[in-house]
């Protein structure tokens, strides 16, 4: 069962940092943008959420790079992966950050940054799909209110669709964080073509 929860501690630490950065930034931007809460629109909140997501990515990507490597460091690697790259053993987040910075520099610390910035679009897509489905549902049933079960279902559907649309980018992100040296040199487009091939 230890292998099922490998790297859980660092992941929880990173989630706390990431959520703090995201919500602090979002609410800070929201209060600066408009003092009057009534003037906020869904589109404004979506734009502010995207900016907060980008700030979060820029500040916490190093933590997620280390997390990816901590989770995967003891798995059996393919023979070509073992030959083509030096996989260090990290004792924790701080040790991982120090080792990656020392061996790979800033490029290693910020591995997968571009895909992470692209993935800020995931909640935006989810929100757009959710609102579209909600409008269609309310059009068909103008006389009665939409049930909480229906809201749950359209929320789940919109999250599934946004995840399916952005999953290839998540895969690229992981490979840029923990792939072979050859894979880490690729940009997002080449990596997508490489995986597809």
Image (cartoon, grey):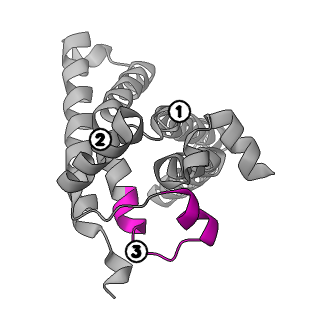
Quarter holding the N terminus is: bottom left
Q: Quadrant of residue 160?
A: bottom right
What span is in magenta? Answer: 68-85
Q: CA distance from mark 2 to mark 3?
A: 20 Å
| Residue 187 drawn at (x, y percent) | 61, 34
Q: Nearer the viewer, residue 35 or 10?
A: 10
Q: Is residue 77 magenta?
A: yes
Q: Nearer the viewer, residue 129 or 21?
A: 21
For residue 178, side relative to residue 37 (left or right): right
Who's the residue at 44% across and 41% down the image?
111
SS of the residue at dot 2? helix
SS of the residue at dot 1? helix
Q: Nearer the viewer, residue 20 or 146?
A: 20
Find disc 2 in the rendering and name its residue: 101
Q: Earlier in the sequence, mark 1 or mark 2?
A: 2
Q: Earlier in the sequence, mark 3 or mark 1?
A: 3
| Residue 102 drawn at (x, y percent) | 28, 42
Res. 74 mark:
3
Q: Earlier in the sequence, mark 2 or mark 3?
A: 3
Who's the residue at 53% across and 37% down the image?
115
| Residue 83 drawn at (x, y percent) | 57, 63
Nearest to viewer (mark 3 / mark 1): 3
């Amino acid at each position: 069962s230890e292998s099922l929860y490998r790297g859980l501690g660092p992941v929880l630490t990173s989630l706390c940092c990431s959520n703090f950065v995201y919500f602090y930034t979002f609410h800070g931007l929201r209060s600066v943008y408009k003092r009057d809460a009534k003037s906020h629109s869904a589109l404004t909140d979506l734009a502010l959420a995207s900016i907060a997501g980008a700030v979060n990515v820029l500040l916490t990507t190093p933590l997620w790079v280390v997390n990816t490597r901590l989770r995967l460091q003891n798995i059996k690697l393919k023979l070509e992966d073992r030959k083509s790259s030096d996989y260090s053993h990290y004792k924790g987040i701080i040790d991982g950050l120090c080792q990656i910075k020392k061996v790979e520099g800033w490029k290693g610390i910020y591995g997968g940054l571009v895909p992470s910035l692209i993935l800020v679009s995931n909640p935006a897509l989810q929100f757009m799909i959710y609102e579209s489905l909600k409008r269609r549902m309310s059009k068909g049933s103008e006389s009665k209110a939409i049930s909480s079960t229906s809201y749950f279902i359209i929320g789940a559907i919109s999250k599934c669709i946004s995840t399916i649309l952005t999953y290839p980018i998540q895969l690229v992100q992981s490979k840029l964080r923990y792939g072979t040296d050859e894979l880490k040199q690729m940009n997002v487009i080449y990596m997508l073509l490489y995986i597809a091939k």
